């Protein structure tokens, strides 16, 4: 039986048609996937369901009853919960404080201890144990997401929307999430899942609805999908090339050399322990490891966002260990940051302004402090086209772009600078299949042009496919360095887990 029906739902942002006459029907107890290219309208449709946007036209029915949600609070009262791609928990508070925050209580005094006990029992019951007294800031990404899901369940949601829940998870955390999803559907919870990862959809979903340019093109049972190419074709409307051209690498001189880097965080916990390796021009070195084993700190030490306690960072033989980030980036290093919102872009500025953040001081962007807007605009228009960034024009507020399209222009901006060293952290995060392949090919092109590339990713397949050499990290150590040809999944997995 359909628990949810969206009928003839359209949503326009000015001239942009985000959703056009969408009909979506979701059965009770199913996991229903929502698929589509970046900018196809998935998040918008779910934001309408959750009361964040009103539809331009159309209606939503829940259990056969017409819904009139104007705010997320209305949606929550109707049993709809949503976990956004960017978490909404307050880091400085404990898990239980986050849970009760904003909830109406019929008691005059809030009994946090009692709530915590109830909450912990509920979490245990769903096989998602979590410490209610832990500070959110101390939780891993996977645990924070678990807290978000539990928050929705604690508020009695029976329809749960998950917008790209695995984009920020390690494969191990994703497996845990899927177990939880299966567990919930056994108890008649209904789940709508947005994902760009085809294997996940095949693994955990019952049916999927594909959106293309805001319109529904198909709703099909996952059991009828023969291969992922078929899904990709439905999304894009044509066949897309899923293979890459990788020539043998021709490594040149050393570009980046890390010598005995050690770093302790403010609580004196060692995060990097005597890390040494180097990257030559014309090669891709992939870093693999379970998230949180020093990868972030390593990238920060290279880009000047952190300074190591010990050791040296050499860029083209120059010591940049204590150099300021802005100066490091000016020396010919590009950085695709792990968190595009925190470090990569300014949401309230236009796409055009975001694209010149790193280069506006240099010719031809400016001369004697005078910006050459004419040149800049025509250059940025081309850039947006090349990277297939979906936006009405380059003056659009960057924050209005879909998640994947924000990622595309950050990547485009960094690659456009023709760096000698590219530090790319999860470059494909949130990208659809076509865009992922395009960006991966671009990384190979950069390598063939002669750039040194440091690629950090939790996707083992991506690391194995693109890297020439692979550095495995485990609790702040380099657990080993392998040539691509000799690396196997099993061996990398074992080394990541701390084995030999
Ligand atoms: N607040 C807004 N103002 C203007 N345009 C918007 C707004 N939110 C979304 N859009 C536009 O609506 C379209 C659909 O965006 P949406 O975020 O729903 O895509 P998506 O399918 O979730 O993509 P992704 O996979 O990249 O997350 C895009 O063209 C986007 O630029
Ligand atoms: Mg989205």
Image (cartoon, grey):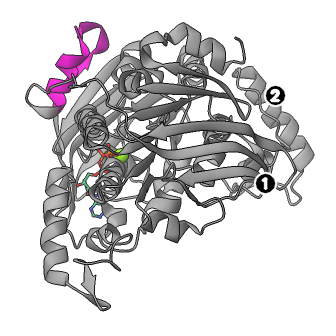
Q: Is residue 378 magenta?
A: no
Residue 153 visible in the current orientation: no
Q: Which residue is under mark 1?
A: 309
| Disc 2 CB within 8 Å of nearest ligand 2 atom | no
Residue 446: horizontal and vertical position, in percent? 29, 43
Q: Which residue is under mark 2?
A: 121
Viewport quadrant of the C terminus: top right
Q: Which residues are magenta?
A: 217-235
Label 2 environment density (alpha carbons within 10 Å; few <14, some 14–19, many ≥20): some
Task: Specify the quadrant of the image occupied by residue 361.
Answer: bottom left
Q: Residue at x 89, y 58 (%)?
A: 109
Residues 365 and 81: in front is 365
Q: Is residue 231 magenta?
A: yes
Task: Check contact, mark 2 vs mark 1: CB within 8 A.
Answer: no
Residue 277: horizontal and vertical position, in percent? 59, 36
Residue 431: horizontal and vertical position, in percent? 33, 40
Q: Residue at x 42, y 59 (%)?
A: 70
Q: Residue at x 48, y 31 (%)?
A: 286
| Disc 1 CB within 8 Å of nearest ligand 1 atom | no
Residues 84 and 106: in front is 84
Task: Specify the quadrant of the image occupied by residue 493.
Answer: top right
Task: Specify the quadrant of the image occupied by residue 198.
Answer: top left
Q: Which of the labelled discs sits on residue 128, or is there none? A: none
């Amino acid at each position: 039986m359909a628990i949810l029906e969206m009928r003839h739902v359209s949503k326009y942002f000015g001239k942009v048609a985000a959703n056009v006459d969408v009909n979506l029907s979701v059965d009770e107890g199913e996991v229903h996937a929502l698929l589509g290219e970046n900018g196809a309208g998935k998040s918008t449709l779910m934001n309408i369901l959750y009361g964040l946007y009103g539809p331009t036209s159309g209606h939503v029915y829940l259990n056969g009853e017409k819904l009139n949600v104007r705010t997320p609070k209305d949606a929550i009262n109707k049993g709809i919960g949503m976990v956004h791609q960017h978490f909404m928990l307050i880091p400085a508070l404990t898990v239980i404080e986050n849970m009760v925050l904003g909830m109406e209580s019929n008691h005059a005094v809030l009994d946090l201890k009692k709530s915590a006990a109830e909450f912990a029992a509920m979490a245990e019951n769903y096989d998602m144990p979590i410490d209610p007294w832990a500070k959110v800031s101390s939780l891993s990404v996977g645990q924070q997401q678990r807290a978000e899901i539990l928050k929705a369940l604690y508020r009695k949601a029976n329809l749960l929307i998950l917008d790209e829940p695995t984009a920020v998870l390690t494969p191990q955390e994703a497996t845990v999430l899927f177990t939880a999803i299966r567990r919930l559907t056994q108890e008649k919870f209904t789940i709508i899942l947005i994902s760009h990862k085809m294997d996940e959809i095949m693994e955990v979903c019952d049916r999927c609805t594909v959106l293309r340019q805001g319109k529904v093109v198909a709703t099909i049972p996952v059991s009828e999908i023969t291969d992922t190419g078929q899904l990709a074709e439905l999304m894009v409307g044509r066949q897309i090339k899923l293979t890459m051209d990788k020539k043998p690498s021709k490594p040149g001189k050393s570009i980046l050399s890390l010598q005995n880097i050690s770093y302790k965080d403010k609580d004196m916990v060692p995060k990097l322990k005597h890390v040494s390796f180097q990257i030559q021009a014309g090669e891709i070195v992939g870093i693999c490891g379970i998230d949180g084993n020093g990868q972030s700190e390593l990238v920060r030490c290279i880009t000047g966002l952190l300074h190591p306690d010990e050791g040296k960072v050499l860029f083209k033989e120059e010591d940049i260990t204590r150099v300021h980030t802005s100066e490091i980036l000016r020396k010919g290093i590009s950085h695709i940051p792990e968190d595009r919102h925190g470090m990569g872009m300014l949401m309230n500025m236009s796409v055009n302004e975001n694209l010149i953040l790193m280069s506006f001081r240099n010719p031809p962007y400016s001369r004697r402090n005078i910006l050459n807007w004419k040149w800049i605009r025509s250059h940025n228009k081309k850039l947006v086209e090349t990277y297939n960034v979906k936006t009405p024009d380059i003056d659009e507020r960057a924050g209005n772009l879909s998640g994947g399209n924000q990622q595309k222009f950050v990547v485009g901006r960094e690659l456009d600078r023709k760096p000698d060293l590219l530090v790319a952290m999860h470059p494909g995060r949130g990208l659809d299949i076509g865009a992922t392949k395009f960006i991966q090919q671009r990384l190979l092109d950069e390598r063939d042009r002669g750039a040194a590339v440091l690629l950090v990713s939790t996707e083992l397949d991506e690391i194995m496919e693109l890297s020439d050499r692979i550095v495995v990290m485990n609790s702040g150590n380099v657990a080993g360095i392998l040539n691509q040809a000799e690396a196997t999944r099993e061996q990398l997995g074992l080394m990541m887990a701390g084995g030999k």
